[in-house]
Image: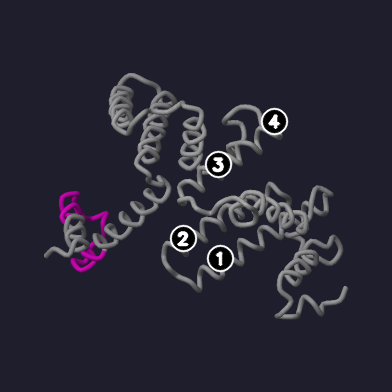
C-alpha cells in the first residue's frame, strides 16, 4: 500500500480517509482500531463534541481547531465502519447532509422568500423536519428523539416536541407553580419514600426546571455549564484564600469557606 497520500500534508480529507483505512486494515492496521465498532466509538464521539463546546466556551481558538479535527475524525471513523459493513460510506454521508441542507433552505437554494426573521426560519425548519418524519412514518411524536442525548438536553427536546402538538403549559408562571409542587414532593419524599421513589421525584423536579428554561428562552445545558464554571471559579477562590493561611478546604470550617465564597461573589461584581 502506497503512503504518498498519507504523507502528503496537503492531502486534505482524502488523506484523512486514507489514514483511517490504513488504521482499520485487518492485516497491517492498528490492533486497537481494527477491533472497534459503532458502539465502542460512540462514547468518544460524544466526548469530542463536548470538547468542541468547551473550547468555544473558553474562547480558545487553537484548541477549537484541534477539537474540530478530533470530531471530524469521529465522522470518518464511523463512515469507514459503515463502508466495511456495507451500510453507507463517507461519500453517501456527505451526499445525504448536502441534500438535506439544500432541501431545508428553499429560501437560499430555491424560490422561497428570504424575507423572514430567524425565528420564522426556525419554525419553517421544524415544520420541514415534521413533514420528513411523517413521510417516513416515524411513528409517535416522541419516537425519534434520540435516547443517547444527555438527559437534560433530551428533556428539552421531548418538551419541545410535545409542545408542537399543543401539550404544554400556557405560560411560565404555571411552570413555576409546577416546580414548587415538585420541590414540596421531594421534601416529603425524604422521610417517607424509598431511594428509588426519591430518585423519581428528583427527576420530576429537574424535568420541570428544564421546562421553565424552555419557556424563558434559556438553553438549560448552557445555563448549567455556566453555573458549573461559576462554581468552579468561586471554589478555586476558596482554595486560594485558604492556601494563603496554610490550610486546605478539609481543614476549614463551613463558615470560613462561606465567607470566602461571598468574597469571590463580591469580587466578580467589582465590589470591595
Q: Main secondary structure of the magenta part?
A: helix
Query: Does dot 1 land on a helix, a strand or a loop?
Result: helix
- How far apart marks 2 and 4 lie (CA) works out to 37 Å
Q: Tell me what residue is drawn at x 74 percent, y 76 percent.
A: 11
| Relative to 74, residue 131 above or below | above
Which numbered disc covers residue 181? none
Quadrant of the snapshot with the C terminus = bottom left
Work out whether mark 1 precedes mark 2 in sequence or the reverse, and give the earlier one: 2
Q: Colour scheme of this structure image? A: one colour
Task: Check if mark 2's residue and mark 3's residue have beta carbons within 8 Å.
Answer: no
Provide the residue designation for mark 2: 54
Provide the residue designation for mark 1: 67
- How far apart marks 1 and 2 lie (CA) works out to 9 Å
Provide the residue designation for mark 3: 126
Bounds of the magenta segment: 240-259
**Where is residue 24 shown, x and y percent of the image?**
79, 61
Q: Tell me what residue is drawn at x 25 percent, y 62 percent.
A: 237
Work out whether mark 1 precedes mark 4 in sequence or the reverse, and give the earlier one: 1
- How far apart marks 1 and 4 lie (CA) works out to 36 Å
Amino acid at each position: 500500500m502506497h503512503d504518498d497520500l498519507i504523507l502528503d500534508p496537503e492531502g486534505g480529507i482524502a488523506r484523512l480517509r486514507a489514514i483511517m483505512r490504513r488504521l482499520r486494515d485487518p492485516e497491517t492496521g492498528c490492533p486497537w482500531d481494527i477491533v472497534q465498532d459503532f458502539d465502542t466509538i460512540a462514547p468518544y464521539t460524544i466526548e469530542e463534541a463536548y470538547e468542541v463546546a468547551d473550547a468555544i466556551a473558553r474562547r480558545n481558538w487553537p484548541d477549537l481547531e484541534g477539537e474540530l479535527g478530533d470530531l471530524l475524525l469521529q465522522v470518518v471513523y464511523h463512515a469507514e465502519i459503515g463502508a466495511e459493513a456495507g451500510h453507507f460510506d463517507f461519500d453517501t454521508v456527505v451526499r445525504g447532509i448536502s441534500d438535506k441542507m439544500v432541501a431545508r433552505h428553499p429560501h437560499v437554494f430555491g424560490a422561497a422568500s428570504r424575507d423572514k426573521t430567524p425565528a420564522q426560519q426556525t419554525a419553517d425548519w421544524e415544520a420541514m423536519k415534521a413533514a420528513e418524519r411523517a413521510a417516513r412514518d416515524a411513528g409517535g411524536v416522541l419516537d425519534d428523539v434520540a435516547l443517547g442525548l444527555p438527559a437534560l438536553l433530551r428533556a428539552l427536546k421531548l418538551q419541545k416536541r410535545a409542545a408542537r402538538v399543543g401539550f404544554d403549559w400556557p405560560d411560565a408562571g404555571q411552570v413555576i407553580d409546577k416546580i414548587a409542587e415538585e420541590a414540596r414532593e421531594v421534601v416529603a419524599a425524604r422521610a417517607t419514600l424509598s431511594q428509588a421513589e426519591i430518585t423519581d421525584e428528583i427527576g420530576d423536579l429537574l424535568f420541570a426546571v428544564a421546562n421553565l428554561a424552555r419557556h424563558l428562552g434559556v438553553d438549560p445545558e448552557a445555563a448549567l455549564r455556566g453555573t458549573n464554571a461559576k462554581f468552579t471559579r468561586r471554589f478555586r477562590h476558596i482554595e486560594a484564600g485558604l492556601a494563603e493561611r496554610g490550610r486546605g478546604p478539609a481543614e476549614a470550617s463551613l463558615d470560613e469557606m462561606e465567607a470566602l465564597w461571598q468574597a469571590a461573589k463580591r469580587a466578580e461584581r467589582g465590589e470591595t
